[in-house]
């Protein structure tokens, strides 16, 4: 990624919500940037209104029980899993921004994009973890969007943007479709690919610049029971 973005830029990681492996991979990438002395800001797919509450936890001003008292942790859609809680633990001391608008917004992707652009680093690295559909830079075959995806919106308004799609060989993810539980996932690694914890750019998928591969995924249940 440094070769592609030698000085600064934005890397969008398009994920499948509700796995253990994707938040862990993202966390490791954040840590590598920090360990190399880079200036980093993290953007998570959480409510913008909850950013300050989350920041208090990351600054050590409130404990984990107080963090989990926010209503957002009671929405069991994979973004509030135990793995995501572990990611929060790993991000202590790192600036983290939520960029999801409140309800009633006509174009949520545009609103997400504007929230991101308002808070992004101009000189540093913005590392974004967001659902794979939001992360797209273009529509794919069969896609039908009412608005451009978050990734495409951001790329049109800023320089040095990379978007990476999550690859996995199958497994399970915690999702609410149609009911909340560990649901099976078919793999999306191309035939003959060698899955590994790596990032690649030799992908012909026009929706993304490349991919990150995490192997087989396992479901991460909610951090807070209803």
Image (cartoon, helix red, strand yellow):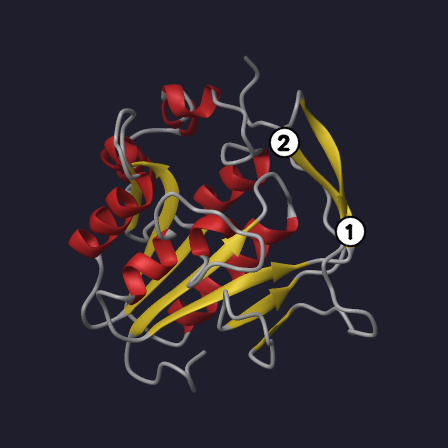
Q: Position of residue 136 (x, y in %)?
A: 45, 58
Q: Which quarter of the picture shows residue 183?
A: top right
Q: Residue at x 46, y 43 (%)?
A: 89
Label 2: how many Cα within 10 Å (few below 14, some 14–19, many 20+): many
**Element carrying mark 1:** strand
Whether residue 131 can be seen here: no
Q: Quadrant of the N terminus?
A: bottom left
Looking at the image, residue 36 lies above or below residue 53 = below
Q: Residue at x 20, y 73 (%)?
A: 123
Foreground: 27 or 185? 185
Horizontal relation, residue 22 to residue 117: left or right: right
- Residue highlighted by disc 2: 175
Foreground: 97 or 162? 162
Count of numbered tags: 2
Q: Which mark is residue 170?
A: 1
Label 1: how many Cα within 10 Å (few below 14, some 14–19, many 20+): some
Q: Quadrant of the C terminus?
A: top right
Q: Earlier in the sequence, mark 1 or mark 2?
A: 1
Whether residue 18 can be seen here: yes
Q: Position of residue 115 (x, y in %)?
A: 22, 47
Give the residue at the far right of this rendering. Answer: 192
Q: Which quarter of the picture shows residue 19?
A: top right
Q: Position of residue 191 (x, y in %)?
A: 82, 70
């Amino acid at each position: 990624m440094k070769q592609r973005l030698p000085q600064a830029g934005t890397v969008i990681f398009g994920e499948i919500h509700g796995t253990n492996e994707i938040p862990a991979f993202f966390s490791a990438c954040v840590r590598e940037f920090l360990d190399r002395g880079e200036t980093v800001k993290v953007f998570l797919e959480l409510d913008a209104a909850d950013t300050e509450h989350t920041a208090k936890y990351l600054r050590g001003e409130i404990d984990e029980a107080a963090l989990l008292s926010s209503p957002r942790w009671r929405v069991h859609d994979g973004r509030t899993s135990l793995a995501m809680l572990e990611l929060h633990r790993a991000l202590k001391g790192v600036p983290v921004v939520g960029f999801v608008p409140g309800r009633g917004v006509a174009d949520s992707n545009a609103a997400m994009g504007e929230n991101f652009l308002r808070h992004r680093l101009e000189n540093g690295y913005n590392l974004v973890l967001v659902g794979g559909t939001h992360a797209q830079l273009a529509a794919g075959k069969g896609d039908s969007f009412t608005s451009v995806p978050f990734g495409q919106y951001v790329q049109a308004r800023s320089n040095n943007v990379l978007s990476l799609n999550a690859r996995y060989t199958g497994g399970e993810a915690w999702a609410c479709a149609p009911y909340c539980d560990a649901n099976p996932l078919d793999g999306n690694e191309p035939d003959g690919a060698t899955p590994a914890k790596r990032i690649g750019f030799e992908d012909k998928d026009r929706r993304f610049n490349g991919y990150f591969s995490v192997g087989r995924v396992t479901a991460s249940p909610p951090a807070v029971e209803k």
